[in-house]
Each structure stands twice: as structure tokens, then as C-alpha cells.
Image (cartoon, helix red, strand yellow):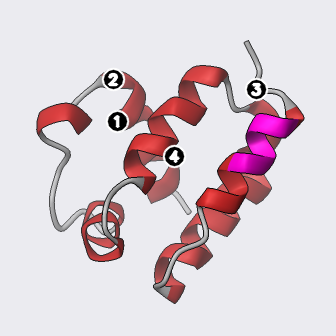
Amino acid sequence: MIADAQTLSRLRWSARRGLLENDLIIERFFNRYINTLTVEDVFAMDQLLDLSDNDLLDLLLKRIEPKGALDKPDVIKILQMLRQM
């Protein structure tokens, strides 16, 4: 199910980061995928956004791979989409 406008707005607000590099990647991600994100995608993105800025950047730049609670298909799917940006 596609996420509703209120959920997407909340996600976009919570995605604001302290590192410009993360902001640029995330903004391009939203510009490309915002209208197609499902509720599951939003939940997976929330999990990535719970990371510190440096840990998120390391994932985005493939310096590290997801492990533990992040090593799940939904999170990996969103991470792959973010890495294309």
C-alpha cells in the first residue's frame, strides 16, 4: 500500500540531516521515489534514519553493509535505492 501524504511529509521532515552529503542523497531519493513509497518502505527508511549521520553515510557510500536489525530485505531494498542516487 502506498504511504499517505501525511506519512510522507513526516518522513521527509525526519530525514533532515546534519551532514550535507546525506541531505543531498536523501533529497534526490525523495525527488525520484516519493510518490511510490509504500508503508513498508517508510518503516525501513525510518530505521535507516535512526542511525547517526556518520553511520548512515558509511552505509550509503558502501563503506559498511547493514547488520543486525538493519539486515532485512525491506531495509536493504531502501538502502539500494538510496545508493543509486
Instruction: Tell me if 84 is positioned left or right of 36 in this view.
Output: left
The secondary element bearing badge 1 is classed as helix
Which residue position holds label 4?
A: 81
Work out whether mark 1 precedes mark 3 in sequence or the reverse, and give the earlier one.
3
Between circles 4 and 3, the one closer to the viewer is: 3
Q: Are discs 4 and 3 less than 8 Å apart at CB? A: no
- Numbered badge on residue 73: 2
The secondary element bearing badge 2 is classed as helix
Q: Residues within 10 Å of mark 4 (few under 14, many from 20)?
A: some
Location of residue 16 with respect to 82 vertically, above or below: below
- The image shows residue 85 at horizontal and vertical percentages of 56, 63
- Numbered badge on residue 3: 3
Q: Are discs 4 and 2 less than 8 Å apart at CB? A: no
Indicate yes or no whether the magenta region holds residue 8.
yes
Q: Please report the bounds of the magenta region as a residue range.
A: 6-10
- Which corner quadrant holds the N terminus? top right
Between circles 1 and 3, the one closer to the viewer is: 3
| Amino acid type for the residue under numbered disc 1 | Ile
Which residue position holds label 1?
A: 76
| Amino acid type for the residue under numbered disc 4 | Met
Say which residue appears at 33% left-offset and 23% top-offset: 73
Instruction: Tell me if 38 is positioned left or right of 25 in this view.
Output: right
Location of residue 32 with respect to 47 vertically, above or below: below
| Amino acid type for the residue under numbered disc 2 | Pro
Between circles 3 and 2, the one closer to the viewer is: 3
Say which residue appears at 34% left-offset and 36% top-offset: 76
Q: Residues within 10 Å of mark 3 (few under 14, many from 20)?
A: some
Distance (Cα) linking label 1 and label 3? 19 Å
Q: How many marks?
A: 4
